[in-house]
Image (spheres, rainbow, N blue to C red):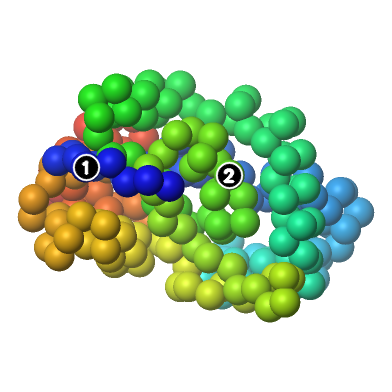
Amino acid sequence: MQLKPASAVAAFDFDGTLTRRDTLMPFLLRGLGWPRFLMALLACSPWLLGYALRRVSNDVAKQKLLMATLKGRSLEDMRGWTQRWMAHSFEASLQDWTMTRLRWHQAQGHCCVIVSASPDIYLQSVALQLGCDGLVCTEMETLNGCLTGLMSTPNCYGEQKVLRLKAWLNGRLGSDATDGITLYAYGDTAGDLPMLRLASHAWYRGRPWKTV
């Protein structure tokens, strides 16, 4: 993606912000089909239940899910899964208010970036489809053209969103880039709050948000 010069950057969470709901589970279901999807959920159910009970971290539960569903899958498989998911579920999942904001920022010439905990295996296509200038997300490890099931970066959640966004901005706009831009941020969960605190202007679940 070609980064445009900009004095303003708009950072959008994806799941629940640009979309109405989570997209990872529908993506995995579309790729695996119901029988294999349910078997994968059963295999990692102790960790998913532990996460629901707040006894297992988001990172651990997510890694178990990704290992159970993606290990050994080829990148060609992922392209097919992405094409099917985007053809059947993507457009209907988009949220009107944030899409209006995204289009407004793009019309103003602002640099727009998705910052998400979801994996790059389908978000790369999403970012291109939406005309975004960049993508910061959880990246998956590959070996010989296949996924290992492991994340190659830390889960892009919470404080990791701030660290990764700052690194992305500094790498493309120069060192200490956050000091020279107006940053807008959009999110919908506690995992987005660190990113919202970094911004000059922030929205949480469709409403303007300020650091308390």
Q: Residue 174, position in %: x, y?
A: 17, 60
Q: Residue at x 14, y 55 (%)?
A: 178
Between tags 2 and 1, which lies in front? 1
The amino acid type found where label 2 is placed reads Ser
The amino acid type found where label 1 is placed reads Pro
**In screen coordinates, is 206 left or right of 156?**
left
**In screen coordinates, is 76 left or right of 119?**
right
Per the model, the C-alpha gap separating discs 2 and 1 is: 22 Å
**In screen coordinates, is 119 left or right of 5?**
right
* Badge 2 or badge 1: first in the primary sequence: 1
Looking at the image, which is closer to me, 73 or 60?
A: 73
What SS does tag 2 mark?
A: helix
Q: Which residue position holds label 1?
A: 5
Q: Residue at x 79, y 72 (%)?
A: 72
Image disc number at residue 125: 2
What SS does tag 1 mark?
A: loop
**Above or below, 93 relative to 148:** above
- Residue at the far right: name it: 35
Looking at the image, which is closer to me, 161 or 132?
A: 132
**Above or below, 107 relative to 63:** above
Q: Residue 22, position in %: x, y?
A: 57, 44
- Residue at the far front: name it: 2
Place residue 78 in its image quadrant: bottom right
Q: Are marks 2 and 1 in contact (CB under 8 Å)?
A: no
User: Is residue 189 visible in the rendered structure shown here?
Assistant: no
Residue neighbourhood size for the residue with mark 1, other residues' Cα within 10 Å, grouped as few (<14), some (14–19), many (≥20): few
Q: Residue 119, position in %: x, y?
A: 56, 58
Q: Residue 16, position in %: x, y?
A: 48, 39
